[in-house]
Amino acid sequence: MAVWLRKVRRENPQDRSQAKWYLTQEKSGNVGLKDIAKEIEGRSALSLGDVQSVLSNLIEVLPVFLKLGQSVNLEGFGTFRISVTSEGAATPEELNARHVKGVKLLFLPSADLKRNLAGITFEIPAEAPTA
């Protein structure tokens, strides 16, 4: 199975007269929680409802630990953590929580997950759509 690619022309933001072509993934669809649960059900002794319940609870519990400032390591999958961006201040005494500009959720895949993606192949359709 291959990941399909398409060709996309992108302008240079500093000089719009310059542009280059790049390859980007052609999305082949969406997989939802129920699809994942069905796949896991077929590989385990758990029922579809049991798998859906576990995944739903994971989605609910994950933010609880992240809001406590903890990273969440799902062994074999990867680690989730929060990253904060803030405005600068002249002195440490001037800094407070109001300086926070945004919060990002970061994901670092595990070595196992990276290894499982190592054999990925790519294809460009003969009549690939271009944008």
Image (cartoon, rainbow, N blue to C red):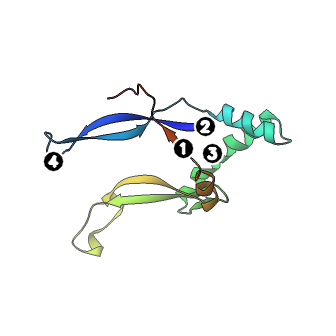
Amino acid type, mark 1: Thr
Residue located at (67% from left, 32% from top):
35
> Disc 4 designates what residue?
14
Residue located at (43% from left, 53% from top):
104
> SS class of the residue under badge 2?
loop
Q: Position of residue 23 (x, y in %)?
A: 38, 40
> Disc 1 designates what residue?
121
Quadrant location of the N terminus in the rendered image: top right
Q: Residues within 10 Å of mark 1 (few under 14, many from 20)?
A: few
> SS class of the residue under badge 3?
helix
In the image, residue 78 sits, relative to residue 9, either above or below, namely: below
Within the image, what quadrant is residue 79 found in?
Answer: bottom right
Q: Which mark is residue 1?
A: 2
- CB contact under 8 Å: marks 3 and 2: no
> Which of the pair 14/97 is nearer the observer?
14
Mark 4 vs 2, N-terminal side? 2
- Drawn side of residue 54 relative to residue 117, left or right: right
> Which of the pair 1/93 is nearer the observer?
1
> Disc 3 designates what residue?
60
Residue located at (58% from left, 56% from top):
114
Residue located at (56% from left, 46% from top):
120
Mark 3 vs 4, N-terminal side? 4
How far apart are the alpha carbons under marks 3 and 2? Answer: 33 Å
Amino acid type, mark 3: Glu
Foreground mark, 4 or 1, reads 1
